[in-house]
Image (cartoon, rainbow, N blue to C red):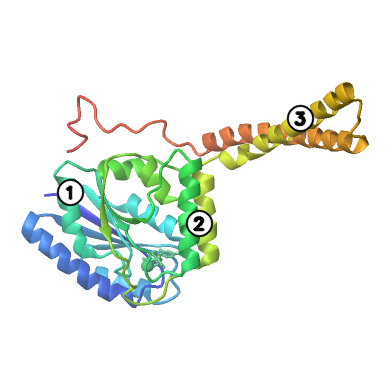
Amino acid sequence: MELISVVVPCYNEEESLPLFYDEIIRVSDGMTAEFGTEFEFVFVNDGSRDKTLEKLRELSERDKRVRYVSFSRNFGKESAMIAGLEHAEGDYVVLLDADLQHPPRLIPEMYRCVSSGEYDCAATRRISRKGEPKLLSFFANSFYGIINKISQTQIISGAQDFRFMTRQMVDAIISMSEYNRFSKGIFSWVGFKTKFIEIENTERAAGTTTWNFKKLFLYSLDGIMGFSTAPLALSLFLGIFSCVIAAVIFIVTLVQFFSLGISLGRFANIVSLILLMSGLCLICTGINGLYLSKTYMEVKCRPKYIVKETEKTERGKK
Ligand code: UDP
Ligand code: MG
C-alpha cells in the first residue's frame, strides 16, 4: 500500500490545529476508501508559545498516525518545512500550512496527477492577490520581476508551498543542504515536472499570520541572494560604465584641443580622472565579487545534478 506523508509546519496554531485535523482526516479517510492509500501526519512544532505542542501530544495519543517533531525554539517556516520533509517516510509527501489556507480537499486531485506518473509534483498557485494590501502586491510583483531577470532559477509568481511530491523529488530537496533556505527557489531548482493548480486566496481559518512587511522583505532578500549572484557583479558593470564615461570625456577634450584649439579646462580633466579612478576601484570590487560568488555557490554544496531516470529505474518509481 502506498503511504502518503502529510507534513505541516505549525507556529502558534492551537486554534487552527483542531479544525485542520478534522479536515485532513475527512480528506484522508476519503482517499483511503477511494485509492487505498495509507497516511501519516508529520506535524512540526516550530517553537510555538501557545498550546500547539499540548494539542499535538493529544492528537498523537489519540491517533497513532500522528507524529510530531517539536523544536527547541522558533526557527522559522523554512526550517520547519525541511524538518518535516526529513522526518516523512511516505512514498509521497504533501506539504501544507496548518491554517487551512492550503485547502486539504485538493489533495485527491494532486494525488491523481502525481500517481498517474504524468507529473512529479502538484502545487497550487494563487491567481489573485485579493485581500492583500496594494503596496505588498506591488513589492511582491517587483520581487518576481527582479528575481526572474537575474536568476537562472525561474520562480513562478503566486506559486505556493502547498505541494504534493514524489519521494524522488523530496529526496532531491533534502539533498540541498544549504542553511539559508528559500523553498520557492529550491522547488524550482531541483527540476521535475510540476502541475500547477490555480486557486483563489483563502482567509486563515483561525489565529494570525506571523509574516509582516519586514519579514517578507528579508525573505525576498534570501531568495535573491540564494538564487542569484548578480548583485555581486553589479559593481563590475558600474565600474566599466564609469571608465567608459571617463574615456569619452577624455577623448572629447583631446579632440577639441587639437582640432578647435579650445580646452575644456581643468574641470573636465578632474571629472574624467575621478571617474576613471572610481571606475577602476569598482572593477576591482566587482572582480572580488565574482570570486566571492563562486565561493558562495561552492559553500552551499548543492548537488551537481539530480537524476530522474536511468535504464535501471522505471521513471524512478518503486
Ligand atoms: N509557520 C512556522 N514557523 C514560523 C511561521 C509560520 O512553522 O515561524 C507556519 C504556520 O504555522 C503556518 C505556515 O507556516 O502553518 C504559514 O504561516 P502563516 O499562515 O503565518 O503565513 P501566511 O499564510 O500568512 O503566508
Ligand atoms: Mg497562512
For the residues labelled 2 and 3, say whether their Cβ atoms are less than 8 Å apart. Answer: no
- List x then y, in percent, for residue 24: 21, 66
Q: CA distance from mark 2 to mark 3?
A: 41 Å
The residue at the point 74 percent across, 34 percent down is 245
Callout 3 crowding tier (Cα within 10 Å): few <14, some 14–19, many ≥20: few
Which of the pair 296/148 is nearer the observer? 148
Asked if residue 286 can be seen in this view, the reply is yes
Callout 1 crowding tier (Cα within 10 Å): few <14, some 14–19, many ≥20: some
- List x then y, in percent, for residue 135: 50, 66
Which residue position holds label 2? Answer: 219
- List x then y, in percent, for residue 48: 43, 70
Check disc 2 and give the amino acid type: Tyr
Which residue position holds label 1? Answer: 113
Which residue position holds label 3? Answer: 248
Could you tell which of marks 1 and 3 lies nearer the N-terminus? 1
State the mark number for residue 242: none
Query: Toward which corner of the image does residue 67 lie, by quadrant?
Result: bottom left
- List x then y, in percent, for residue 209: 42, 71
Check disc 3 and give the amino acid type: Val
